[in-house]
Image (tube, rainbow, N blue to C red):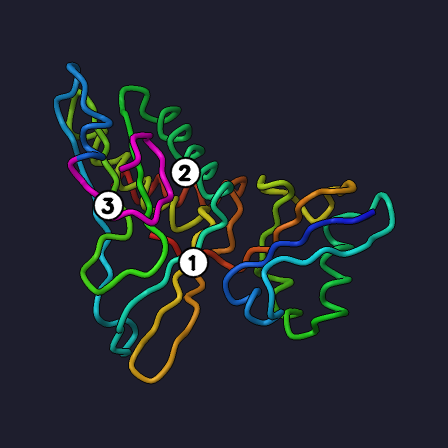
Amino acid sequence: MPLTRTSVTTDELELSAVVRLVDAPATGAVVTFVGLVRDHNQGRRVLHLVYEAYQPLAERALQRILDEARERWPAVTLAIHHRIGRLAIGEASVAIAASSPHRTDAFAACRYAIERIKQIVPIWKHEYFEGGDIWIEGATADPDDVTAREAALRIACT
Amino acid sequence: MHVKIRLFARLRDLVGEGELVRDLPAQSTVAAVWDQLVAEFPAIAPYAASMSCAVNADYARLTTVVRDGDEIAFLPPVSGG
């Protein structure tokens, strides 16, 4: 099990381990997010997903998200583990924990983290569904795109 | 000079391999690497507008100048989470 606050791993994710990475005596709140593989997508019956990463850059991008969150919410500690490889329906693909002395910042930072993951982390879903397979393509990754970052902040803080 | 090119997800599928080594003139930019790749594999041309690039596992710009031995990655739009 990875013990660092950012991880891109083929291992099964364990939320309790991610929570332990952000727990501290000053913590009054921990907010977690777990992304799961669901059995349908845009009208297709999904059989399983295969996640691929550009691993060294994905790890750097996760670290960048931690740095951005620290800049915006200095009291928050964040940990993000993302799984890659073949995942069955119901398995966790991403686990995020945000701790803070108070709940408001922890909720915001956790939401910010998942929004930024979808914007800038070089990971791709290959969806295998009944009748075929397709690469899912979301956002063009550009960490310096201020508009995207502001959009993530806005979602996190409303 | 020689550079290593890394391709991911559908870009890799279109090209047929995820790792290539190509010869380029010194002082080439990432854009020149991409253009050479598109000339060889026209199927990837539509990604010009949506892909990102990285040099040595750090996000880069098309104007970034590459050096001998660099690893240039072209990334289709991401879909993690």
Please provide percent x and percent y for residue B43.
Answer: 65, 75
Please provide percent x and percent y for residue B7.
Answer: 59, 58
Q: Amino acid at mark 2?
A: Leu
Chain bearing tag 2 is: A
Provide the residue designation for mark 1. Answer: A124
Q: Name which of mark 1 and mark 2 comes first in the sequence.
A: 2
Q: Residue at x 21, y 70 (%)?
A: A39
Q: Amino acid at mark 1?
A: Trp
Q: Residue at x 44, y 47 (%)?
A: A121
Provide the residue designation for mark 3. Answer: A13
Query: Which of these two is toward me, B67 or A63?
Result: B67
Q: Is residue A93 above or below residue A75?
A: below
Instruction: Give the prevailing secondary structure in the magenta stretch.
Output: loop
**Magenta span covers which residues?**
A1-16
Provide the residue designation for mark 2. Answer: A62
Q: Name which of mark 2 and mark 3 comes first in the sequence.
A: 3
For marks 2 and 3, give the CA distance. Answer: 16 Å
